Amino acid sequence: MQELLVIGAGPHALALLATLLESTPDKYLEHPENGLLFYRTRPDAGDSARTSHLLLARDTHYDSSRRPRKTDRDAVARVLNGLGARGARCSVHKKDRGMIDAHVDERVRGPGSLKTGLTGSGAGAGICPPVEWIKEHTLVLDKLGGTGYAGGKECRKLGTWMSLWRKQMEFLRVPHLRSPISHHPDPIDRSILWQYAMAKRRTSDADLVPLHILRDRSYTGPFILPSTELFWSFCADSLVNGFGIRDLVQSGEAVDIVPVPCGCSVDDNQDLSNEQNAQSKFCDHFRVEFKDGRLVNARNVVVAVGSSSCERNIPAWVKTLPPGYPKHCLCHCFDIALDDATYLKSFSSAKKGPLRHKSVVIIGGGITSSLIDLTPMFVANKNSIHVSRTALDLGCNSVVLLSRSKLRIQPFDVDVRWVGPHRSTNIAQFWSDNEYQSRAHRLRLARFPPKADEAYSGSGATITHEAMELVRDDLASGKMSVTQEVEVISAKWYEEVPQHGKWELLLSNGSTIACNIIWLATGTRNTVSTNTLLHTVAKHYPIPIQNGLPSLREDLSWSRNCPGLFVMGSLAALQVGRGAPNLMGGRAAAGRISRSLIERLRKAYRAGQ
């Protein structure tokens, strides 16, 4: 039986493994019990009394023993000096490992009982599992996994980590991340990516892209965005190679997680779908079913899947189309990015591009109106400008972008105050609200401020200034055009020759448009009801659902009777906050989960001694 099974090998999963294996993680983690975070807030006048009480309460939970501030530079220097040596960050000093033991015992047994934890009864009462033991008993699953995705030079250094993410980014020609340089999976320090760029002498505009934001009262810059190549190189050198986890990822696609209550047989052939009163029993472990029929039993499971594993958001008019049109002439941009060979091989393989002499219509740029009412922020949609740029690079004659509402040009997909130093204020106010319904409302306001909600009809269509620069010449020449505030009413396929033809689209403004290919940039939907991995767990251990999101516990575990299942990503937003799907949310979620997971792994390690 596996002690830890991580479903997904993206940035969130990498952040979790790094946090579990790091001996001196950053103490400035976004957690409701971090007093340092709350001391940096400035409460509003109406909430001053309530927030002041929180400041005092949170201070009692502040754990200064994790890493003294005076050793911050030493911790970062240790990482930078060990670059290039495989497993260098696994060489943990006894003093550092003892710090983790003290941290775990105080969290589990409560403040003031540290000595009891370290000298309590039973052998190994204060022993933290060794790094090598954690790696031996951990399995990470990825769709590509062992099949691998080579990519460029920097990508190959990552092995099989972040294969899906890297493939999407490279297919869409994304030159740099949208997240600032302080957002990354490394738990050691927020500034480590910047210091890595300095140490490698990669500080040119090609690697560090300055973000131009108009200065106003909410300006918290300057912001610097790392290039994708720099980010891949950093993750490979600092995390994958530093912890020696390059070969930890295996190929496999999980389709269901079946909880096994205490007292039930671990026989793989036993049918657990009809367990009586399962929700009243404590979950002992999980039986994970694979798409190829394999079964794996795991005591702890972390769901860290990204947007590529979520249900595609398909417009209603597509579902009413009669069969008969070629699959490659109407598809979702996510599917193309993950399997471009299948979708592009049917076209001409001309030197100037497989889409030569073709016209493409890209539908999207934001969230559909029906989805906004249900899930205010939990749709991961590819930037339609990058999709357009990809189509042009593949040789098409013309690209038409259809957007349901006006496109918003802004640096991030949320208000800038949720990204810079003022983020502490917003996230502290978010955690001060104990009502999940109110938290869901705050999440929507973070993405759609009142003025933008009114002006843009609640659209999630946000385009960066840098992305618009990529297609400025094509817009000027007429090779690309953007039609805003319009929707597709219906479509009809006319087949001229086998497997080739054209579409005729009827738009909401009464006009029609003809094209050869339709790409859907309408994003994906990730809720409990659409995530097939969680169907069985939600049935046997039901918890409150708010706007499609589960009301997880503070450590991101599923429920009190099902503590071995942890959820990361957008589904954890009611606890983590607005940045849950992003890099900063992955780092924060990893910090929460690791606290409980280390204790659960320690019990297993102690039992096996």
Image (spheres, helix red, strand yellow):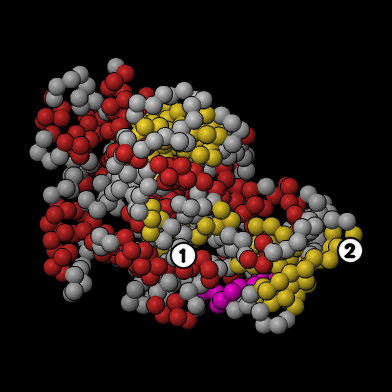
The residue indicated by pointer 2 is: 496
Give the image quarter of residue 242: top left
Residue farthest toward the top in the current orientation of the protein:
609
Which segment is the magenta one? 400-408
The residue indicated by pointer 1 is: 374
Q: Is residue 237 above or below residue 490?
A: above
- The image shows residue 456 at horizontal and vertical percentages of 50, 78
Question: At 62% from the left edge and 43% from the top edge, which residue is drawn?
Answer: 151
Locate the N terminus by quadrant. top left
Q: Is residue 516 left or right of residue 250?
A: right
Question: At 11% from the left edge and 29% from the top edge, which residue is drawn?
Answer: 116
Does residue 131 appear in the picture of this structure?
A: no
Question: At 50% from the left edge and 60% from the top edge, which residue is drawn?
Answer: 379
Quick one: SS at disc 1? Answer: helix
Q: Amino acid at mark 2?
A: Glu
Q: Is residue 124 above or below residue 31?
A: above
Q: Amino acid at mark 1?
A: Leu
